[in-house]
Image (cartoon, rainbow, N blue to C red):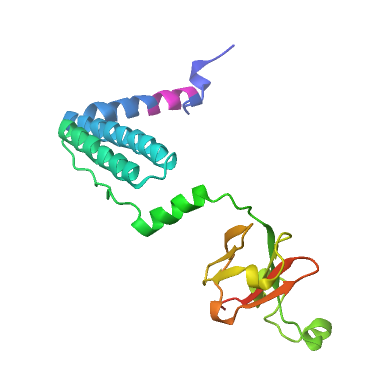
Amino acid sequence: MFDPEFASAEPSQFELLNNLIEESEGFNKKMNPEELRSRQEEEKYMKQKQLEEERILKDISSSCHSDRYSNSSTTLNTKIEVIDKLIGTKAQKLDPRIWTDTELDELEEDFEDEREIPDYDIIYQQKVSAMDAYLGIDPEKDPSTSCSDTLCANIRLPKTKNLAEIELDISSTTFSVKTEHYKLIANFPQEVIEKETKAKWNSKTKTLQIIVPVVR
């Protein structure tokens, strides 16, 4: 038979949970009504702003006309101002000109370009001497990509006849290859020294090889 005198004085998990709920409810009741209302209004504003930004950005991505960009961003600013007046807060306005004219022209050109994207790969290379290979003398070198010296990009262009047909542009972070039939714009996996780039054309495999040292 259960004897209340020998019952444990420690509260059960159910009682602890009830105590936490009561404390939480008591805290909310003690909160200043103005602070509670202000927090609710702020949360509502941020939710409305996020939904509106997502809608406008979706509209922007579906078109590449500069007027569409400007009008969409302006509409977003106008609607944010209306929400600000209703809620009494001030939002950070977006710049109507998100992209420059040059960037817009390039974006529109990419959408209209029907040239193929060639198959390519980028591999890491490391200069290893015979002593390093067989004796492992250099303690700072290991087979990982972090110890690589150069990057080698192989771009396969089966419809290209010779190197003269290829337009190659290299920067410290990207490279582009353009021919009559192909167009490729890609990123290097890490920063490179573009001034020391070497390019080779293999006429048998119709492959352009780009070798460029990485920044250490």
The answer, for residue 21, to whether it is visible in the render is yes
Residue pictured at 52% horizontal, 22% vertical? 6
Location of residue 50 by image quarter: top left
| Residue 148 image point, x, y percent | 67, 75
Q: Of 163 and 125, which appears nearest the observer?
A: 163
**Up-down relation of residue 151 to residue 45 (above or below):** below
Q: In the displayed structure, would residue 184 be above or below residue 197?
A: above
Residue at horizontal 34%, vertical 39%?
53
Q: Is residue 193 visible?
A: no
Name the spot of residue 22 as percent of width and height, x first: 34, 24
Q: Is residue 4 above or below residue 192?
A: above
The residue closer to the viewer here, 86 or 166, is 166
Q: In the current view of this chain or complex, which residue is farthest to the top?
A: 1
Q: Is residue 93 left or right of residue 112?
A: left
- Relative side of 16 to 142, left or right: left
Q: State the quadrant of the C terminus.
A: bottom right
Residue 154 is left or right of residue 88, and the answer is right
Q: How many marks?
A: 0
Task: Confirm whether the magenta stretch covers residue 80.
Answer: no
Main secondary structure type of the part rendered in magenta: helix
Image coordinates of residue 18 in percent, x first then y, are 41, 23
Report x, y in % for residue 4.
Answer: 49, 16
Q: Is residue 15 magenta?
A: yes
Left or right side of 211 for 6: left
Above or below 13: residue 156: below
Q: Which residues are magenta?
A: 14-20
Quarter holding the N terminus is top right
Residue, x 44% and y 50% (percent of image)? 108
Q: Nearer the viewer, residue 54 or 91?
A: 54
**Res. 170 image quadrant:** bottom right
Determine the residue located farthest toward the right in the rendered image.
134
Q: Which of the 4 image quadrants contains residue 121?
A: bottom right
